[in-house]
Amino acid sequence: MGSERAARSRIEVEAEGDGFRVRVDDGASRTSHFVTVSAEEQARYGPATDLRHLVEESFRFLLEREPAAAILPRFALSAIERYFPEYPEEIRRRLGGR
């Protein structure tokens, strides 16, 4: 169910201020989120990756585990790891890292 939700969801990521505005449309609902990514978070999760791509793939990861409405409206990227300890390893794998 979660991977189906992630696959059918439209995720838009745009730079806004000191972070990214992420809009998710799964056909049934639309949500908006604001995510910050520090230099340390980029180095930890996706050092050789464009930040927009890192944020988009992180939302796909989240949508495989919970509906968009359950995702916090505002958070730092590292908050994902507090809820999903497998996030660092999985996001690096998805982005082609080690």
Image (cartoon, helix red, strand yellow):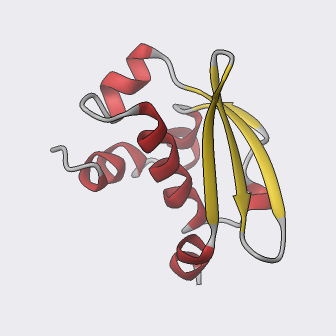
As drawn, the residue found furthest toward the right would be: 29
Which one is in front, 34 or 1? 34
x, y percent for residue 7: 53, 75
**Location of residue 20 by image quarter:** top right
- How many marks the image carries: the answer is 0
Which one is in front, 82 or 97? 97
Please tell me whether residue 93 is drawn above or below residue 77 in the rendered image. Answer: below
Quadrant in which the C terminus is drawn: top left
Please tell me whether residue 53 is drawn above or below residue 27 in the rendered image. Answer: above
Left or right: residue 80 compared with residue 74: left
x, y percent for residue 61: 49, 58
What residue is at 52 percent from the left and 24 percent from the top? 37
Please tell me whether residue 57 is drawn above or below residue 28 in the rendered image. Answer: above
Left or right: residue 91 compared with residue 47: right
Please tell me whether residue 47 is drawn above or below residue 4 in the rendered image. Answer: above
x, y percent for residue 65: 58, 66
Left or right: residue 12 compared with residue 70: left
What residue is at 61 percent from the left and 57 percent from the top? 11
x, y percent for residue 91: 35, 49
As drawn, the residue found furthest toward the left would be: 98
What residue is at 77 percent from the left and 76 percent from the top? 27
What residue is at 24 percent from the left and 31 percent from the top? 48
Quadrant in which the N terminus is drawn: bottom right
